[in-house]
Amino acid sequence: MNLQQTAFAIYELMKSFSILKITNCMTRLRLQLNTEYIANLPLKELKNIPNVLGVNLNDNELQIILGPGKVNEVTAEFKKLYANKNLETNAQNTNQDTNNNQKQFGNAEELHQQIRKKNATPFKLLLKRISNIFMPLIPAFIACGLITGLLNIAFKIDPTLTNYPAIQVLQIAGNAVFFGLNIFVGINTAKEFHASPMLGGTMAAIITHPMLNNISLFNIDLLAGRGGIVAVLLVVAFSSWLENKLHKIVPKILDLFLTPLLVILIATFPALFILQPIGGIIAETIGVLVTSAINSGGAITGFIIGGIFLPLVMTGLHQGLTPIHAELLNQYGVTILLPILAMAGAGQVGASIAVYLKTKNQKLKQTIASALPVGFMGIGEPLIYGVTLPLGKPFISACIGGAFGGAVQAFFHVGATSIGLSGLPLTASTDKMLCYLIGLFTAYIFGFIATLIIGFNDPIEE
């Protein structure tokens, strides 16, 4: 079955449901549903569609796991099918009462907002905002991190390469995302708070501007970039709130030029003297806590962190770790947390290989065979929702593998120069590649052995 046929099969099962929003991430087709229909979802039938690696229901969001690359094509095709269905339905109902018709088909966004308010706690909303701010930056982190990692390998082989202009240009390319990180985060934060992206970027530039280092005001020495992205998040959240308030107050005829002017004038001084220092304290505390915990706890800390990361992924709490990685990179040039967390996915690979060897269920074998390649590449959702979590015990085994792998990474203090990568691809971005690979294969092996020891209930072939 090709991907268009997969999209059509999903559509056939879902066309009778009220879908409020269709989106996708790197691996999943995400369907926001009207809550009254959730109990009748054909989850079992969806899992049996070829190319579908698993399904997950999170509140009113149905997540259909397809894997990287495939998800983009399936989502695009599904959107076309569902859009055509809505057009046909609207055409068939043109003679019905307009208000009823609008209530059924035209108020999807209103229904979506109502469901979001019902299901979203403040903490979940915060994590979602953080995810929305940093997810668009992941491709840049990956590209720049890989360039930097590969250059580091080359420099170890031949240190004189740093003298070549072409290599120096590549060094700039590898550092580019970090050079502009504060501004990028400012732009995305303003977008997330429904404010002007360029004003958000401007506020980030103000607190990062190198001229601040030459200014002492009210006996306070200003410091460019203090607080890193944490300060940017606080400052732009404030300026965005201010901008939205001013839009409601400033007369429409003056809004275009007066509101931006007032935002910059009013927000700049609180940003520099209140919010940036607070951000600095938070950022410095995060850096000290993470590095101290790993440095002092060593393998024990790595064991604990590596072992609990998969449950964090299941609850969505892992979304809050992205700015921590970014801030560690900003402060130290590497994040020693990411290599530890990456071991959770490696534990899943080992557990899934063991399941593949022991299961007699051909459908399960097929699922594992299709999910393992991306699992080795560090994308774990297909294995989580398609293999280890549905079987139960292998999920525990994967956590055990992740714990042992995390212990190795912490013991050797492995750091990564990028975020967004995991699995084998992360190797090139680490500062101790051999140690990272030792930890990675440790997680594979212990996830495998734990699964053989603990076992699992082999599902009956249908």
Image (cartoon, rainbow, N blue to C red):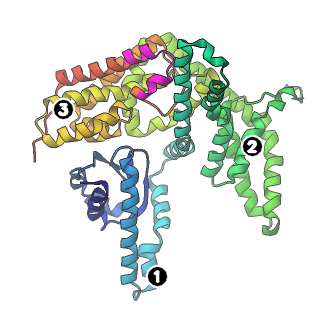
Q: Is residue 276 left or right of 10 when viewed as pictured?
A: right
Say which of 347 and 433 sits in front: 433
Mark 2 residue type: Met
Q: Which secondary structure type mostly characterizes the magenta part of the structure?
A: helix
Residue on which the image places disc 2: 203
Q: Is any atom of residue 31 visible in this view?
A: no
Quadrant holding the N terminus: bottom left
Q: Amino acid at mark 1?
A: Asn
> Is there CB contact under 8 Å for labels 2 and 3?
no
In the picture, residue 182 is in which quadrant?
Answer: top right
Q: CA distance from mark 2 to mark 1?
A: 44 Å
Query: Residue 235 bears which disc, if any?
Result: none
Residue at 51% in and 10% down: 296
Q: Position of residue 398 (x, y in %)?
A: 29, 27
Q: Residue furthest bottom?
A: 95
Picture residue at 35% right of the left edge, 23% below the top? 402
The x and y percentages for residue 232 are 68, 38
Which segment is the magenta one?
Answer: 425-439
| Residue 287 image point, x, y percent | 60, 22
Location of residue 344 (image quadrant): top left
Is 276 drawn above or below residue 61 in the view shown?
A: above
The residue type indicated by label 3 comes to: Tyr
Does 340 sit left or right of 55 as displayed? Answer: right
Q: Residues within 10 Å of mark 3 (few under 14, many from 20)?
A: some
* Residue placed under numbered mark 1 in the picture: 99
Query: Crowding near pointer 2: few (<14 within 10 Å), some, many (20+)?
Result: many
Residue shown at the point (60%, 19%) measured from the top left = 288
Seen from the viewer's position, the closer of residues 36 and 443 is 443
Q: Label 3 belongs to which residue?
A: 356
